[in-house]
């Protein structure tokens, strides 16, 4: 039989054991029952599995993210790397810039190297692609932060809806009713959840919101938020606060405001999302989505799957919290 068609999933299914058990046998772990070891080794010998490729898959975790320059992902990576190192694992870091062709190439190249597991922040609209990857993967995959519309996956994320709800409620409690919402890409799960939370807070407090006027899309991008804010400042739109769906867009908003001699928070209040490191420098009130903890839990999930400490799919949702600084003011 062709080596390329033989995967750990194939061996596990044929031996009626888990993928983790197969991996442990291939890595020489003596804790597996001798009869099961012999059964797996017989399948490998008969069907021609490529042991050389598998022998490389030791204590390496592949981390694939959209953009390494985004400070939010830097927080996640720190949590991943520190936790991996603590348990004697190393990481291979790749970025795909929301390009599926690049993502596909990385996955193929890394699979040839052999790794213990994958931690992936998925791309926009990539459900079909990841369905295919899940079928081919020899190692466990944990999706991080963004969701994909696939059943029975391993996922670690944050409760974006409650985080956005609490942030909007914070502004409302300060007396703000005319609030601009600066949005990210509308087809990313984190953006959808944050906008849902924002709208729920407004609805619960009987505040009307005109999307055509007050929702501005800046795609989690500094330059786009800067341009959007300049247009807002030139308009006659009435508002007292801005909710930004990520901190990076807050920097663009702040730059434009300064150019128009608009003071934050004296003239307008501003709240962000993510609590990236630079946010404390400008005194930004923001929502911490627990990025470091997400990275940490993703690694622990991979290790738990490999060691068979868990049998069900991972579904970890961390609770966000508001970090109050000085960019919001009561009116």
Image (cartoon, helix red, strand yellow):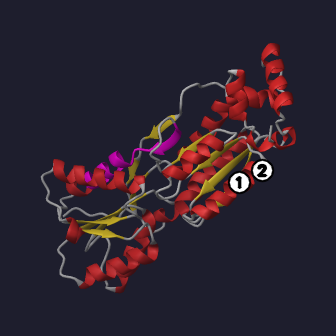
Q: Nearer the viewer, residue 235 or 217?
A: 217
Q: Which mark is residue 108?
A: 1
Q: Give the image location of residue 118, x and y in percent.
A: 65, 45
Q: Residue drawn at (23%, 49%), measured in percent from left and top?
A: 200
Q: Nearer the viewer, residue 54 or 223?
A: 54
Q: Quadrant of the N terminus?
A: top right
Question: Does 91 appear above or below 37?
Answer: below
Q: Inspect this view and state whether residue 251 appears.
A: yes
Question: Does 30 appear above or below 272?
Answer: above
From the image, give the main secondary structure of the stretch colored magenta.
helix
What residue is disc 2 on?
Answer: 112
Q: Give the image location of residue 298, x and y in percent.
A: 59, 41
* Element carrying mark 1: helix
- Based on the picture, tell me whether residue 80 belongs to the magenta stretch: no
Q: Which residues are magenta?
A: 153-170
Mark 1–mark 2 CB contact (< 8 Å): yes
In the image: residue 86, left or right of residue 101: right
In terms of image quadrants, where is residue 177? bottom left
Q: Nearer the viewer, residue 330 or 210?
A: 210
* Element carrying mark 2: helix
In terms of image quadrants, where is residue 247? bottom left
């Amino acid at each position: 039989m062709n080596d390329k068609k033989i995967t750990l999933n194939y061996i596990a299914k044929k031996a009626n054991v888990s993928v983790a058990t197969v991996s442990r046998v291939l890595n020489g772990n003596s804790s597996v029952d001798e009869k099961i070891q012999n059964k797996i080794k017989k399948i490998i010998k008969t069907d021609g599995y490529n042991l050389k490729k598998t022998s490389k898959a030791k204590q390496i975790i592949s981390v694939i993210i959209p953009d390494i320059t985004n400070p939010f992902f830097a927080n996640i990576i720190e949590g991943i790397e520190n936790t991996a190192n603590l348990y004697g694992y190393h990481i291979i870091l790749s970025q795909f810039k929301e390009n599926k062709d690049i993502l596909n190439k990385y996955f193929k190249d890394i699979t040839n190297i052999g790794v213990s597991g994958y931690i992936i922040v998925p791309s926009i609209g990539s459900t079909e692609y990841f369905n295919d990857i899940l079928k081919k993967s020899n190692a466990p995959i944990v999706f991080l932060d963004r969701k994909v519309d696939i059943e029975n996956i391993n996922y670690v994320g944050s409760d974006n809806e409650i985080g956005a709800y609490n942030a909007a409620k914070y502004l409302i409690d300060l007396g703000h009713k005319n609030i601009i919402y600066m949005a990210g890409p509308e087809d990313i799960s984190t953006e959808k959840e944050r906008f849902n939370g924002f709208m729920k807070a407004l609805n619960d407090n009987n505040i009307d919101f005109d999307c055509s006027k007050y929702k501005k899309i800046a795609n989690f991008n500094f330059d786009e938020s800067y341009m959007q804010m300049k247009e807002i400042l030139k308009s006659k739109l009435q508002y007292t606060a801005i909710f930004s769906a990520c901190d990076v867009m807050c920097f663009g908003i702040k730059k434009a405001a300064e150019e128009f001699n608009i003071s934050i928070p004296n003239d307008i209040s501003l709240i962000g999302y993510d609590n990236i490191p630079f946010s404390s420098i400008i005194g930004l009130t923001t929502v911490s989505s627990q990025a470091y903890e997400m990275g940490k839990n993703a690694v622990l999930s991979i290790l738990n799957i490999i060691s068979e400490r868990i049998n069900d799919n991972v579904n970890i949702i961390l609770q966000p919290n508001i970090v109050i600084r000085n960019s919001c003011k009561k009116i």
